[in-house]
Image (cartoon, helix red, strand yellow):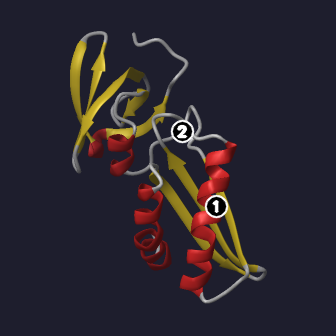
Amino acid sequence: MSRIEHELRREIEPVVDGLGFSLVELKASELKDGFHVVVTVYRTAGVDLDACAEIHRTILPRIELWRDARDVNLQVSSPGLDRTLKHHREYAIFAGKRVRIMLSTSNEWISGVLSASDEDSCTIETADGMRRLAFSEIRKAKLDEFREVR
């Protein structure tokens, strides 16, 4: 995460939390035509178009004030049903959701329900029982809402 993204996250995450959402991901970049920000948010009840619009209306003025600029392009979206988990804090956000995890030592997916996580590992409930997996051994992890746990 860049310094700008880190600072912007500190600025808007409390606002997003206050609206009842979790800030899953934030990307920010300075381009010729202005400052571009992409925000991905989540809540258990779902994220619809009205929710994205509410978040957009609420955080855009704050970003403009923070950047001291009006040329901010802001996109707000939901994480999607098959999101690739990119950071350890996402595992906590998506606790209770179905996931598929591929370990660095295998090419096979482990499917289960994400039950817990901390800064070093996550625990998933598979058909064979609970498995604790260190993030250092995970090659890839995705939300997997449409598959049955095997």
What residue lies at 48% left-to-right and 54% top-to-bottom?
19
Q: Which residue is more in the foreground, 59 or 150?
A: 59
Give the image quarter of residue 113: top left
Q: List x then y, in percent, for residue 138.
A: 34, 39
Judge whether 58 appears above or below 123 on screen. below
Give whichever of discs 2 and 1 has the lower sequence position: 1
Q: List x then y, in percent, for residue 127.
A: 31, 10
What residue lies at 47% left-to-right and 59% top-to-bottom?
16
Q: Which residue is more in the foreground, 129 or 62?
A: 62
- Check disc 1 and report the residue beneath it: 56
Determine whether the residue tagged by mark 2 lies in a helix, strand or loop. Answer: loop
* Quadrant assignment for the C terminus: top left
Under mark 1, the amino acid is: His
Disc 1: CA contacts within 10 A as few (<14), some (14-19) or many (>=20):
some
Give the image quarter of residue 130: top left
Q: Which residue is more in the foreground, 4 or 86?
A: 4
* Quadrant assignment for the N terminus: bottom left
Distance, label 2 to label 1, CA atoms, is 21 Å
The image's mark for residue 83 is: 2
Under mark 2, the amino acid is: Arg
- Mark 1 and mark 2 in contact (Cβ < 8 Å)? no
Q: Which residue is more in the foreground, 44 or 146?
A: 44
What residue lies at 28% left-to-right and 46% top-to-bottom?
136
**How many marks are shown on the rendered structure?**
2
Determine whether the residue tagged by mark 1 lies in a helix, strand or loop. Answer: helix
Disc 2: CA contacts within 10 A as few (<14), some (14-19) or many (>=20):
some
Tell me: 63 left or right of 72.
left
Q: List x then y, in percent, for residue 133.
A: 24, 34
Q: List x then y, in percent, for residue 92.
A: 32, 42
What residue lies at 47% left-to-right and 68% top-to-bottom?
12
The residue at the far right in this view is 33
Tell me: 84 left or right of 54.
left
